[in-house]
Image: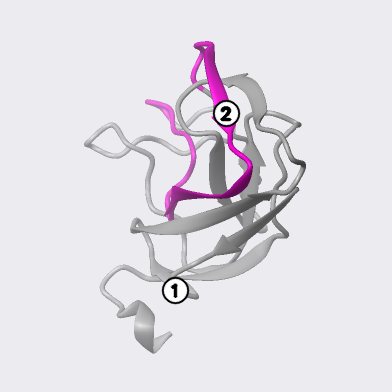
Amino acid sequence: MSARLSLPESSLRAGGTVTAQLIVQNNTGHALHFIGCGAPFQILLSGPDDKPTPAWAGCATRMTVRVGTSTYRVPVKATYNACTSDGGNGTPACGSDGKPPPLPAGDYVVTTYAVSTKLPVPSEASLTVVPQGTDPASA
């Protein structure tokens, strides 16, 4: 089994989202079954001051990766993964909309997490977050 990550861009505006494709090649000759909830993969950006951990939904649903090639569309967000109402414990304060704030501009590591250790994850990649109001294509 193998996995490959395809990012549509090499840079992303702070607070923005792009949809990556995660291509899983299951050449084992049999379908892979596991228990998960929601999407089987998460992609998070980590930087020098932010090392996020994935948060998985708490339900148990049977999932299957069929034999052959499967493609998953996974959002990549240039925001913090979590926030709190008061910004305590090193977690940033939520915005007025209750959502995590944008990441600061800079270079980030793109890391894929799988809901099950049975699933392959691709190598890390790089992504540059540019300031809001900046065209990511010019970065």
Q: What residue is pinned by disc 2?
A: 64
Crowd rating for badge 2 (residues with CA inside 10 Å; few <14, some 14–19, many 20+): few
Which quarter of the picture shows residue 12? Answer: bottom left
Crowd rating for badge 1 (residues with CA inside 10 Å; few <14, some 14–19, many 20+): few
Count of residue discs: 2
What span is in magenta?
A: 57-86
Magenta run includes residue 59: yes
Amino acid under disc 1: Glu
Which quarter of the picture shows residue 9? Answer: bottom left
Mark 1 vs mark 2, foreground winner is 2
At x 28% / y 31%, what residue is drawn?
Answer: 98
Q: Are marks 1 and 2 in contact (CB under 8 Å)?
A: no
Percent coordinates x, y for residue 55 in the rendering: 55, 28
Magenta run includes residue 66: yes
In the shown orientation, is residue 41 left or right of residue 134?
Answer: right
| Cα distance in 3D space between marks 1 and 2 | 29 Å
In the shown orientation, is residue 49 left or right of residue 77?
Answer: right
Return the disc, 1 or 2, that comes first in the chain's sequence. 1
Percent coordinates x, y for residue 75 in the rendering: 42, 49
In the shown orientation, is residue 41 left or right of residue 78?
Answer: right
- In this view of the protein, which residue sits in the foreground, 129 or 88? 129
Quadrant containing the C terminus is bottom left
At x 43% / y 27%, what residue is drawn?
Answer: 84
Q: Which mark is residue 22?
A: none
Amino acid under disc 2: Thr
- In this view of the protein, which residue sits in the foreground, 64 or 126? 64
Percent coordinates x, y for residue 111 in the rendering: 64, 52
Percent coordinates x, y for residue 23 in the rendering: 57, 55
Q: Residue furthest front?
A: 29
Q: What residue is pinned by disc 1?
A: 9
Instruction: Classify mark 2: helix, strand or loop.
Output: strand
- Indicate whether 53 appears above or below 6: above
